[in-house]
Image (tube, rainbow, N blue to C red):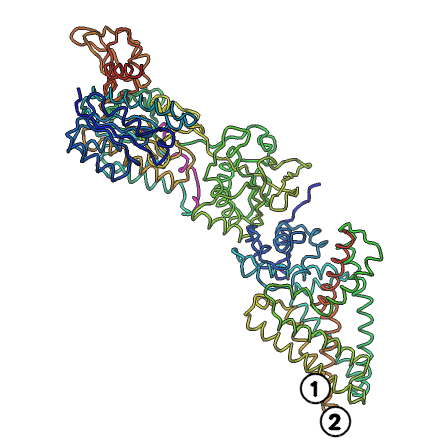
Amino acid sequence: MKERIGVYICHCGGNISDYVDVEKVRQAVQDDEGVVLAKTTVFACSDSNQTDMVNDIKEHNLDGVIVSSCSPKLHLTTFRDVTERGELNKYTYVHANIREQVSWAHSDDKIGATEKAIHVVKAAIAKSRYAKPLYPNQFEAEKTIAVIGAGIAGLKAAISLSDKNSNVVLIEKENRVGGHTATWGSLFMTDERGSELIDRIYSDLSQRENVFILTGSEVISSKGSIGNFTLKIRKKPQIAGDPVETMEINVGSIVVATGFEHYSPEEGEFAFAQNEAVITLPNFKQLVDESSGKVLEYNGKKIKNIAYVYCVGSRQTEGENKYCSRYCCTSVIHTAIETKKKFKGIQNIHLNRGIRTYGKQELLYAESLQMGDLYLQFNDDTPPEIRNEGKKTVVTVKDILSAGRELEMEVDLVVLVTGMVPRKDQSIGKMLKLPKGRDKFYNEVHMKLRPVETVIDGITIAGTCQGPKNISESVNSALSAATKSFSYVSKGTLETEPIVAEVDHEVCSWCGKCAEACPFDAIEKQEVNGKEVAVINTSVCKGCGMCTPVCPVDAIDLIGYTSEEMKSMIEVLA
Amino acid sequence: MATRINPRFSEELKKYGAINMNACYNCGTCTAVCSLSTTDDSFPREMVRLSVLGLEDDIKTSLKPWECYYCGECTTNCPQTANPGELMMSLRRWLTAKYDWTGLSGLLYKSMSLTLFAMLLVFAGVLYFANSVNFNLEQMLHTGHIFEMVAIGTIMFVIFVPNLLRMWNFTVLKAGVKAPFKTYVTALSDLFVHMFTQKRSKDCDEDDSFRWLEHFILVLSYLSLLFTTVFLNWFGTGSILIIIFGYIVSFLIFVVTVDFVSSRMKKKKSLNKFSQPSDWFFVIWLLLMGITAFMVRLFIDLNILESNKWMYILHLTVLAQWALIIVPFGKWTHFLYRSFAMYFSKVKSMALE
């Protein structure tokens, strides 16, 4: 039981004090049992108040601290750290939210808001009396790291991990490494060939003793959690008739780099699969790369005028792909320039929705303009129309840059500039429970601050499985994910939050209800002292509390939110 | 109805001097900085767009290229160095070629060697003529004078009238403007004001009063010299007033054209940076006209022309080249087309009201 509790009530500028009479709240709680200090403050999070709190803890010999302010999402960690600076265990800190849940919610009722604030703070005081010091769980971590997918992102992640002296298992479903990049000819900005780039990286990687490359191999199941994943891998037979090989590996962290697929237009989408002269960007790139001679030919027809229709399968107003695929503008402009340089008499006509050759890639756009490429821009609601006039293909478009005028052109080839879509095969994501965004690519925790981590501890994402990226962006994220994955396991031991579920094995008699309720597969049936009971895997448990109310015998408690604490809060509120 | 584009048109326009117009990314800075462009009548971006897309019919019906006086602001401010000012200039050359029913303007604009060949041919013709009259000065002067009168009449009725009708057809009739006859009469004052004063160029932000004055003096001096030599028979007259007037105007032509030639050589302003052969021929031949006419009259007054017949043959050559090539098929025509463009534009706006 805490006997020396300090309570701080925040004005939040006026966000709280405009609606809640904070002084009245202070007076209402200052004589509560165990409260030795009750203060109001204009900004509890300000540096000066934090310093005051640290001094108060020492001066008044406090054993519990409460701040009544904004949402714990914003400042829980701030005040836990203040408590720690005052040399108290940071888990003894209790937070009361009187802004989002009181002043903002009841701005029309000041008296009622003040009354509710008093109750919320009193409940926090009640909880504080029972708050126990807690310590993070520590366990040993496997230092090997798995990289799933050996495209450009996976390969670079593997090299980066190998450089850090980490053992790496690189798993690739196909029989060769390099993904899409290996199939590409000249790449934009560097003019290097994709296959050469991959050859160079691969020959470096294959000489490294701490890298194990498994091609033709699939991860078929995953168990465990950060620090101790067990992956089951199936390797396709190299020679037909050989038995299928399966193996198990233990890794501390996983980098997922499973890549993307090219958008495949529907039949009839911009006359695709109906008009022979309509092809997709990847096919066109291959055609240009593989053709020789002075004149470009396709299906035995000489190609001179080429129309490129942008944003096919990206930025859809009606379809599902709302996002921009980022790489296509630059890729098609680069290919158009290459085509014009390589073959005679080429006229490129770009039908676009605004050119997004950001950064240095803008130089390619400038080059293409200087070379005489034509740019027409259409609105998303009036896409270009493609029709046949005898054997000729005619494209009609309403050009924004010509005051929306309807213009038409006779072309020899229409290239649909297709974007990136998520892999159809989402088995890895399902197996590892990776959340997906609205775009159906795997999602990071925070776009800006935690850009390669997933909500599953120990699993990072790299490259285009996270969303459309060009090669440099993929490599950037791969190096970042590799470093993040390495940092999880590099110390050899791991710490996790102490706020996890706890089972009283005396009371538990395994019914399985808690395991069903757990969204993280953190509860397993185990035999303890000759009795089947539920055991919590503390490195997987997130402390969400889903299991506690379903237990019929009340054998599960959530540390930090024990029944004792919750009941005391309810009593105060009642 | 969709209009068909012609991306290869830019290659044709480049032969008329267009530079780098494909670099345009349609920001519209040129139109924004142009002090002559208005909301209802905006350029040059629109003309750049039409040119890039190769919408020839639209360009042919447009008067906008003539509404530009090439202050060069657009070119100076273009972030893509797409040179809209020079594009407008090239369009004026292209339009000149389109208005010309003989098609010779286009050939001469596009081919330097053909122009030189035509110049030499005229020179040979003059020599042939001089030889045929045994270099008799009297006869040469007399025929030269008759030639001037005949040339003016012929060019006017055979070349200019049909060409102006064609221009009217393209820019007014085909543009769908129906104006009553009265409008044409009322608007006439605009025609003459613009023809002689270049009034509109005063609206340019980069108002260069000195250049405007030079151009104004040149126009008046040129027309005066034409009048003096043709109708007052400067080389044959005894009137001291006419003689002195002729000296003054031919001298003025010489002075102004020397400055024009030197600014084209110095290339300080954007309108002087990209001279095409047609521009050089125009100013240099005007200069030569002034100086040789001045010298011929001086030789007459000093009584040394008889012993220096080459001076008159030189003048006659310059005159014939001017009258047979530069006036009907070269840059001289801008004098007419620009002022008629202002006239038609006035007619159009009156008809729309």
Name the outermost residue toward the right: B181
Residue A342 - label: none
Nearer-the-camera pick, A394 or A256? A256
Q: Which residue is mark 2?
A: B303
Q: Is residue A311 left or right of residue B171?
A: left
Rendered view: B139 above or below A470:
below
Residue A477, image x and y in percent?
A: 34, 37
Q: Which residues are magenta?
A: A171-188
Q: Quadrant of the N terminus of chain A?
A: top left
Residue A387 part of the magenta-drawn span = no
Residue type at mark 2 is Asn
Characterize the magenta stretch by its predominant secondary structure. Answer: loop
Task: Give SS at disc 2.
Answer: loop
> For the residue carrying disc 2, how many other residues have a C-alpha within 10 Å: few (<14), some (14-19), or many (20+)?
few
Residue A176 part of the magenta-drawn span = yes
Q: Is residue A346 left or right of residue B128?
A: left
Nearer-the-camera pick, A314 or B75? B75
Residue type at mark 1 is Met
Q: Which residue is mark 1?
A: B295
Which circle's residue, 2 or 1, is located before the other in the chain?
1
Q: What distance separates the C-alpha of mark 2 from that of mark 1?
A: 12 Å
Residue B271, image x and y in percent?
A: 59, 66
